[in-house]
Image (cartoon, grey):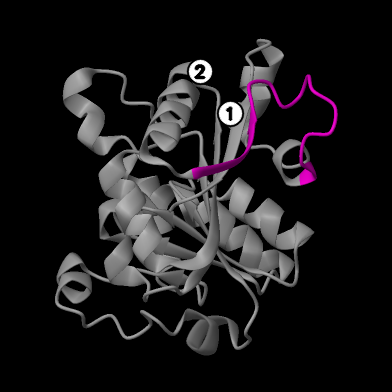
Amino acid sequence: MGSKNKLKRFRENETFSNVYQPTRDELVKGEFQIKGNWNAEVFKNDNPLVLELGCGKGEYTLGLAKKYPNKNFIGIDIKGARFWRGAKTAVEDGVSNAAFLRTQIELIDHAFGKHEVDEIWITFPDPQIKYKRTKHRMTNATFLERYKSILKPEGVVHLKTDSEFMHGYTLGLLHGAGHEVLYANHNVYKQEGSPAEVTEIQTYYEGQYLEKNKAITYIRFKIK
């Protein structure tokens, strides 16, 4: 994507009512007024609040929002030029239960209040296979603590990935730390009875993985 195109998308994002772009300072200093008030300020209802972390182009956030109109969805990514597509489509299609937040995932507990979130989706994260990069792995113990602080006590996390490594690493971590694995599947498209929200909504890249017969894995769990 050219820099002109990126700048155009950044400018357009600023005009969308469903895009929120707090600065790092605002978040860290506790000046982000929407923290703890997403439903009241943004969605104007008390429906369950669901996050998609690393939402890319926003296809999954939008797909979930259309499938579950009685839940509120927020796609989160640091790359605003990417989720521009999802935000624009949501505006054009009148999808009022989808919003987008531009921030880094490690600041998640500065953007949401304690026990404000009902569910978290992590879709196709970078598995960060190299040992030195484990601190960036989105299901490591540090990230799970951040998620736990914003999730309701019965809140659920979903991990959908094409990485067998990420699937195995996460399962091992969850079992080792005594978290509750509710469902785990190594190949959701080949097994009968897979959850509808896992198989009926696909990202662009997921379609490409499936064309190459790559297995898509899924875990649903609670952080104890």
Q: Which residue is mark 1?
A: 205
Q: Residue at x 61, y 33 (%)?
A: 218
Q: Amino acid at mark 1?
A: Tyr
- The location of residue 185, given as percent across then percent down, is 66, 27
Give the mark, 2 or 1, whose residue is nearer the N terminus: 2
Q: Which residue is mark 2?
A: 164
Q: Quadrant of residue 76?
A: bottom left
- Locate the N terminus by quadrant: top left
Q: Residue furthest right?
A: 192
Chain part drawn in magenta? 180-196
In the image: residue 35, left or right of residue 47: left
Q: Amino acid at mark 2?
A: Glu
- The location of residue 151, given as percent across then percent down, is 45, 65
Q: Residue furthest top?
A: 212
Instruction: Tell me if residue 72 can be seen.
Output: yes
In the image: residue 175, left or right of residue 183: left
Q: Quadrant of residue 200?
A: top right
- The location of residue 128, given as percent across then percent down, is 31, 25
Mark number for residue 95?
none
Asked if residue 155 is positioned above or below residue 79 in the image, the reply reads: below
Secondary structure under tag 2 reads helix
